[in-house]
Amino acid sequence: MELILNYPAQTAWVTAFGLALGLALGLVVGSFLNVVIGRFPVMMQRQWQKECAEVTGMTPEPQAKFNLATPGSHCPKCKTAIKWYDNIPVISWLVLKAKCRACHTKISARYPSIELLTGIIFAIIVWQLGFTFTTFVYLWLACLLISMFFIDADHMLLPDQMTYLMLWTGLGFAMYSGHIPLQDAVIGAMAGYLALWSVYWAFKLLTGKEGMGYGDFKLLAAFGAWHGYQMLPVTVIASAASGAVIGIIWQQINRNKQGQPIPFGPFLICGGVIAMLWGEELLGSYLNWVHG
């Protein structure tokens, strides 16, 4: 993301148009990401159940078709199909006063929040990069990170389909754009995976407990592919710092749930984004401080 911040400023009308278009596109995509975040873990669970049944020789139980498109959007309480005019990002939530039109069940503020978050991120990327191939690469990265952030927060799960997509996209983008040497991207992917893999096994051998999941290894490998091995220390330190602060706050708020595992993926994503945006400045400041 260091690449983004170095692009020249656009003219005023291009900036305004880019912000508006990016925001509108992000709101629409954010609405779809809500579907991905809600349904993808269920789809994975159903696939696992089917595979387990096949391995054990059992006949899988018949289930209604369920994917990102089917069934259509509906109220989870009363099952009423949501009309298109009640499915406009953010606006419909405000107009309906955060309630289902049919049964008046409260609609969580999380849905418009994800839509607005995606819209703001898209607007910033389009504003900085204009309309280029690189823009769409970073928009794709943003979609993956937002989806993984909330899926892991909800289910302590980082889907391989997403971590691998991020990894291979990062390597391909390094080869295409040259924003970092391809060698640095490959080493970053290898070092990222091995770093957390080593921590995992050291912790398990010392305590007999699992401190993190394999999805975290793959996610750090993907970040290594995007910003090279040089930024991995910044990513890990920023992730640990954010995790420690938020973890302490969470434990204080939820005293009755102390000892319950907390997903590391969201903090790793925060650390990775910090490294992408400000990694070189942070690393340079640290080196200057060390060398006096």
Image: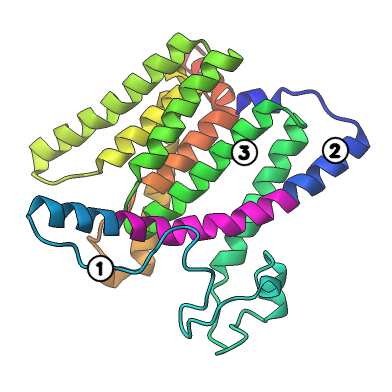
**Residue 241 visible in the displayed image:** no
Q: Residue at x 91, y 31 (%)?
A: 11
Spatial CA span between label 1 and label 3:
37 Å
**Residue type at numbered disc 1:** Pro
Tag shown at residue 15 = 2
Q: In the drawing, does residue 250 fall left or right of residue 273?
A: left
- 159 or 121: nearer the viewer: 159
- 290 or 183: nearer the viewer: 183
Tell me the residue that label 1 is attached to: 62
Mark 3 packing: few (<14 Cα in 10 Å), some, or many (20+)?
many
**Residue type at numbered disc 3:** Leu
Tag shown at residue 139 = 3
Q: Residue at x 79, y 44 (%)?
A: 19
Q: In the drawing, does residue 7 fall left or right of residue 115?
A: right
Location of the N terminus (image quadrant): top right
Please name which of the two marks, 2 or 3, marks the residue nearer to the observer.
Answer: 3
**Residue 60 visible in the displayed image:** yes
- 123 or 43: nearer the viewer: 43
